[in-house]
Image (cartoon, coloured by chain):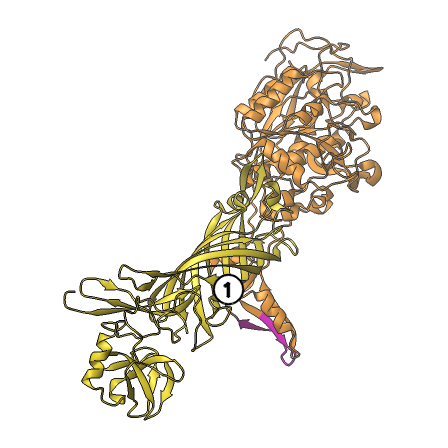
Chain colours: A orange, B yellow
Amino acid sequence: MTTPRRTSVHASRSRLRVRLVLTAGLVGALVAGIGQPATGAAQRHKIGNVELPGIDLGLDRRAVPDAIGGKRPTSARAIRTRDWLPGRVLVKYRSKPDFEILAIDEHENAESTAARFAQRDDVEYAQADYVAHPHFRPNDPLFDQQWNLTAIDMERAWDINSGAASSLIVAVLDTGVAYSTTVYEYIARGVIVGSRRYPPLGRVAVPFAAAPDLSGPNRFVAPRDFIWDDDAPVDLDGHGTHVAGTVGQLTNNGVGVAGMAFNVRIMPVKVLDGDWDFIFDSPNVGTTSVVASAIRYAADNGAKVINMSLGFPPSASIPAVEDALRYAVGRGVFVAISAGNDFEDGNPAEPLAEVAARVDGVMSVGAVGRDLNRAYYSSQRASVEIAAPGGDMRTAGASGGILQQTYDPLIGVSDPLSQPVSEYGPPRFDTFRYVPYQGTSMAAPHVAGFAALLMQQGITSPAAIEAAIRRFATDRGAAGRDEDFGFGLINPRDTLRGLGLSR
Amino acid sequence: MSGRRFTLAIAVLVGGGLMPVAAHGGRAEFQFLQIRPDATSQKVKFGPTPNAPQQPPTTTVATGTTLHARCDESSPVRTPLRAGEVVEIEAIVEGWVHVRLPASGEQGCVRRRALEAIPADVIEQVRRRPDAPRVRSDPSPAPAPAGAPAPGGRAVRIAVFGYGGVLNLAATQSFDAILGESSGPVVGGGGQVAILKGPLRNVFFQVDASQFEETGERVFVSGGEVFKLGIPQTLTLRPLEFTAGYRYEVVRRGADGRPHAAPFVPYAGGGVGIVQFEEHSDFAVTGEDVDERFTSYHVLGGLDVPVWGGLGVGVEAHYRWVPDGLGTGGVSREFNETNLGGATFRVKVGFGF
């Protein structure tokens, strides 16, 4: 075991720091101007695996029943292309207690025939024998609280595409993901924040658990930690776990909440360092070089969609990241990027969003609240390309946030340096709760999951995915593209359904 | 074939309708006799008559009988003949005599046994007549050169027909995006009334309906690239068309100097119609599928070829315009294609009455 290098505080981080684009619960947790330059490589040590008893981690694939009423017609093609069964109509005569099924020519239009029957005086009603379609509604008990999914008609979108497939990989470039159940040992240094002095905790064994509503066999692929330079991108914050949940939370598993593309595999890629990474003296912090490397890593390791709920300082010039994004797009990867949360802080430009706006296949995502208006924090700039639910708890309270499973905030894991020193102690990352967050960080993974559905449906080009998302967006605000919503609110159902010949 | 005479009876399909035609074969060569389709009393003139017109020989109906359209018991009966009625003898073929009724000019066939015995000199006279056919087992009326008036018989001919063909759609890119091809099979049928007499002779009126139905996939189009979405999409076109046209009865002089009708009848026409257009797809809710009707315009042209009896076949080229039937949404808007019509090449089979 190596002695940690960092045991003192008061250091200043002079490198370009990646900002978490999140307002509630997380904003302010990253404290600039503290910490010292590293003098050696920090390490963490895996000291065991812990099973979580009683938690079903199995991926639950939704099976959409072929709910066809009545006898199947002889022509399979007919049932696939019409809303009603050919060769029959239902007729209720006034003299009879119930309807009768009358056979008609299979080539007749059953609706027209029924309409003719309905005109008869002795007929109470007549109708074609319509085929029932499943309206998938997940059995996740908290789905009722996920206004964000019903607002974009995900139930009908899932009728068309039931959560993509495990062959699709979505990389979540974030603070890591609660993907593993294990215990790591860290050395926690002391930290001074303003007048508060958080004492060094020395060696601490930190338990991690895989988020039970996110994890399952073969759910995670090619994990990579660019903050700790290893293959264990555990989440020491909760932000990445929340974001990953919106992308692909297990759905229809009778547990918790739903996610957009619940059958995809998640590639956890850690590019953001949280407070605990700082306290534990991680060898790297989230910089342009880290983010650019991570983008290339994801593209080279099979990801077809990348979610980046992060941003850079307004003055930053990020050609290295733009190059990496173009590289990823060139390899067929779509990228969703949060547009920024700083509307009330001068509404500055967000460099990543600016890049997204000029790269086809990379989209910057603004946030709407439950009322589908621009969230109060969401950047209002020309770089906003599309809008998705990000939550607005100022107007709707906690129920206006985006509900996903992440670490239990009651144990203070995500904001250790905003807690009173008296409550400061070793963290544990094995306790979960369904927590409402808000931010464009929450909006972007809606688009990432949506893009995964589109890829699975057949739109394989990132630029075409962006074009499709724009084409079918529900216009909000000023007619056409505007700075609040971009091209509008995402419309997964209509986009997945695509175009017919004339409609 | 040497020393043996044979007869080929064919009928000409007229825009889907049929006209009876007689054709004659000789020993070493075929000698076709083109007959007008209207089965009226025009005679074919087999070249210049060297002498002054001869009075045709006559005979008398011995017993009450019927005048048949052709020298065939199963052919349609044209009129009853009373005993004692005088008929002009046109030709004698085995047990039948091809006659002309002096009063009406109507022509047809009568059983030879129903007539008074025909003297040998009359038989010889018939044989020596310059326009006498050598063999005439199907003495259906011969057509006059185009434009000649029809002095008697029916004023119209009715025919029914069916056809199959290939529709090549004008909105090439749009249909190709959905169906993977811009053409497909079409089937249809209809009826035709052809004018046989008067100033509108050779004009025909036709109504027909057809259907084109193909299933493809819904798509998304970006930068000209088509992405198929795996959602079945069925496109149906059901045109109902009304056509007016003109048939060109071609009569040519053969090497023997006699007029010969071509073994086919070209025709051309145009008209208007209504096209019912449907789009059905999975996952559609009310209002998302399409069931609309558009006015269409078309032109057509083709050739009718007689086969046998009232049966005939034909080929036809057809072009339909359905302006603004597309282009307001879907892939047709992406490709800026507005014409829901296209060209059809059809093979027709019909029967005339």
Say above or below: A300 vs A165.
Answer: above
Q: Is A19 located above or below residue B95 in the figure?
A: above
Q: Residue at coordinates 62% horizontally, 43% vertically from top-left?
A: B333
- Chain ID for label 1? B
Q: Where is residue A335 in the image (x, y as percent from the top left)?
A: 62, 29
Name the quadrant containing residue A390. Answer: top right
Residue flagged by tag 1: what amino acid is it? Asp
List x then y, in percent, for residue A218.
52, 34
Residue A95 lies in the magenta-colored region: yes
Front-most of residues B282 and A25? B282
Horizontal side of A358 relative to A222 (left or right) equals right
Most foreground residue, A43 or B327? B327
Q: Is residue A189 magenta?
A: no
> Residue B169: horizontal and vertical position, in percent?
51, 49
Q: Can residue A201 be seen in this view?
A: yes
**Depth check: A197 or A445 in front?**
A445
Dot 1: element: strand
| Residue that mark 1 sits on | B208
Q: In which quarter of the image is residue A263?
A: top right
Residue A397 position within the rendered picture, expressed as x and y whole percent measured from the top left = 82, 39
